[in-house]
Image: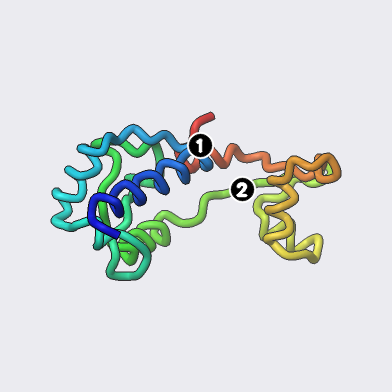
Amino acid sequence: MAGRDRFNFYRSCKVNTCKRKGIEWNLTDDELQDLLDEAGITIDDVGRGTNKYQLSRYGDTGPYEVGNCRFITQLDNLSEMKRRGPVGYSVRIFGKEYESYKQAADILNINKGTVRNRCKSERPKWADWQITTDWRYNHGRKR
């Protein structure tokens, strides 16, 4: 894929991911290119892998806009996430409060992913499984 095609592909994928997650994307093509230039990288340096670069928001909050994001290596991005620690998700299942997916999973003797999926499900049969922490706020997503 040629440089400009790869740039457009990356941008459209990132914009679609942001839309799906409810995160605002306020960067123009020129602003995105300026961020690449500031980092001293090309679009070919962006992607997955410890030596590849990723567009990261400061503190993983707020929109993607000038002044709130920059390109850093995947390794640095993962280090920041580890230092920040996990975002807390408290849940309510059949009226009982749990501090986290893990606590609910341990007490109910089921997989943590099962708890998460049921809490996020919009199916009526899982209506009594609810996330009580506003997880979108913790991730800088729109309310």
The number of callouts visible is 2
Type of residue at label 1?
Answer: Gly
Give residue 91's mark: none
| Residue 87: image location, x then y, percent | 52, 50
Judged from the image, the secondary structure of the residue bearing numbered disc 2 is loop
Q: Residue 118, how many percent across, how many down?
A: 75, 50
Considering only vertical position in the picture, is 30 above or below 71? above
User: How has the structure been colored for display?
Assistant: rainbow
Image quarter in which the N terminus is found: bottom left
Secondary element at image label 1? loop
Q: Tell me where residue 59 appears, x and y as whole percent.
A: 37, 46
In this rendering, the answer to whether 127 lies above or below 9 is: above
> Which is closer to the viewer, label 1 or label 2?
1
Is 137 above or below relative to 109? Answer: above
- Give the residue type at disc 2: Tyr
Q: Which residue is mark 1?
A: 22
Q: Viewed as shown, does residue 23 lie left or right of 66?
A: right
Write the residue at 14% across / 49% down.
38
- At 33% from the left edge and 70% from the top edge, which residue is drawn? 50
Name the quadrant of the C terminus. Answer: top right
Residue under the image location 49 percent in, 38 percent down: 19
Query: Label 1 crowding class (10 Å Cα cut-off): few <14, some 14-19, many 20+?
Result: some
Marks 1 and 2 close (CB-CB < 8 Å): no
Which of the labelled discs sits on residue 89, or is there none?
2
Query: Is 50 or 14 nearer to us in this picture?
Result: 14
